[in-house]
Image: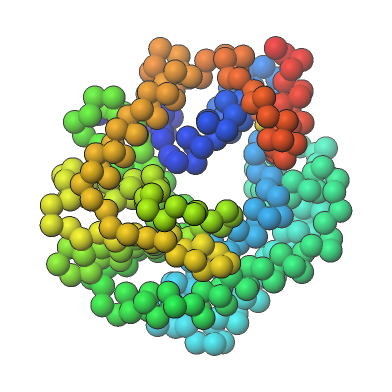
């Protein structure tokens, strides 16, 4: 089995993009192959790839702030001064990044060291009045969490757990996110990436996984999200097995800003289901690479990646400019 940076990898985000629009998937994950078409196009793409709407930045910064707050809890340094400092820092960072984005010359050469651009600025939409509201939303999300019923339970996890995992969204550790699945031929040499926002290992093989969510809240509370099942798969694989045995694994998804929670228990069937789902997903992904060779992971020519037929999706797509430009080369 061999793992290289270029190997095909599967993650829930990647699958979501592929199902959303094949062309967007190509732009996101095979950007470097654009240099064979046109270098300017590739550099434009790299810039667009780092654009996020102001709403997406709110969610990104909420993740950063909550992760930093949980680390304060872990080290028992969650004094009100330290929490205020976290809030001030995130406000300053958001303001600085907003101003950098607003004043950027988007015709200039792509700069790999500066990636905090807003989609609205790139497409010349005035969002000055939305910055204070965006900062407030991020801070409100932390305050809502601190005053929620979930908060004392999380504090308790820090007191009684053998081990607590907190994701570092500012600097994702991809190596640590990787799952190795031995013994399933279809998944040989494929990297599976997964990492929960928060996980606690208690005594007696008891586990808790918590993931934060934004956006539309689920109505169906009984369906366990694939993402959660993949996290559990990763946990049990660390014990070099594929069955849950006596492990007691509970999961929760916490929606922000409402703090609505859904959750339940993981069973062995969930593990079997997710393994089959990963195999199906990977087989689908392989259809877009030359010779199904997951180690080389070379994409088919871009014409093989279809555009979505949904105008609504295109209207809000970050890549809409270069997607149009690419038509000249088709
Ligand atoms: S603009 Fe539309 S077709 Fe092009 S990548 Fe975006 S969603 Fe896909």
Residue at image location 33% in from the left, 79% down from the top: 156
Looking at the image, which is closer to me, 245 or 100? 245
Looking at the image, which is closer to me, 149 or 243? 149
* Ligand 1's quadrant: top right
Q: Quadrant of residue 200?
A: bottom left
Please indicate, yes or no, whether residue 176 appears anywhere in the rendered image.
Answer: no
Above or below 311: residue 219: below
Please indicate, yes or no, whether residue 10 appears anywhere in the rendered image.
Answer: yes
Q: Is residue 119 left or right of residue 145?
A: right
Instruction: Quadrant for the N terminus, please.
Output: top left
* Visual colour scheme: rainbow
Residue 164: percent from left, percent from top: 32, 67
Q: Is residue 31 left or right of residue 254?
A: right
Looking at the image, which is closer to me, 175 or 251? 251
Residue at image location 21% in from the left, 34% down from the top: 182
Above or below 78: residue 103: above
Residue 4: percent from left, percent from top: 37, 32
Residue 326: percent from left, percent from top: 72, 20
Residue at image location 51% in from the left, 74% down from the top: 145
Residue at image location 72% in from the left, 40% down from the top: 316
Residue 324: percent from left, percent from top: 76, 24
Instruction: Quadrant for the C terminus, please.
Output: top right
Above or below 306: residue 95: below
Q: Quadrant of residue 25?
A: top right
Q: Is residue 242 left or right of residue 319?
A: left
Above or below 241: residue 126: below
């Amino acid at each position: 089995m061999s793992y290289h940076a270029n190997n095909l990898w599967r993650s829930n985000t990647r699958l979501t993009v592929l199902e959303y629009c094949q062309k967007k998937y190509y732009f996101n994950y095979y950007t470097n192959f654009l240099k064979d078409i046109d270098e300017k196009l590739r550099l434009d793409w790299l810039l667009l790839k780092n654009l996020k709407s102001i709403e997406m930045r709110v969610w990104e910064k909420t993740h950063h702030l909550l992760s930093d707050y949980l680390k304060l809890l872990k080290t028992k340094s969650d004094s009100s001064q330290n929490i205020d400092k976290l809030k001030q820092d995130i406000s300053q960072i958001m303001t600085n990044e907003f101003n950098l984005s607003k004043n950027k010359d988007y015709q200039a050469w792509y700069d790999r060291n500066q990636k905090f651009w807003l989609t609205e600025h790139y497409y010349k939409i005035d969002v000055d009045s939305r910055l204070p509201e965006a900062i407030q939303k991020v801070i409100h999300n932390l305050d809502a969490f601190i005053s929620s019923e979930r908060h004392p339970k999380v504090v308790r996890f820090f007191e009684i757990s053998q081990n607590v995992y907190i994701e570092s969204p500012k600097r994702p550790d991809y190596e640590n996110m990787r799952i190795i699945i031995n013994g399933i031929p279809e998944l040989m040499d494929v990297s599976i990436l997964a990492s929960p926002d928060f996980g606690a290992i208690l005594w007696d093989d008891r586990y808790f996984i918590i993931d934060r969510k934004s956006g539309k809240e689920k109505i169906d509370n009984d369906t366990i999200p694939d993402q959660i099942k993949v996290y559990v798969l990763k946990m049990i694989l660390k014990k070099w097995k594929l069955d849950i045995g006596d492990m007691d694994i509970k999961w929760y998804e916490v929606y922000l800003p409402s703090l609505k929670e859904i959750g339940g228990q993981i069973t062995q069937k969930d593990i079997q289901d997710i393994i089959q789902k990963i195999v199906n997903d990977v087989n689908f992904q392989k259809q877009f690479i030359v010779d199904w060779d997951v180690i080389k992971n070379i994409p088919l020519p871009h014409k093989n990646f279809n555009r979505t037929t949904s105008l609504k999706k295109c209207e809000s797509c970050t890549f809409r400019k270069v997607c149009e430009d690419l038509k000249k080369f088709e």
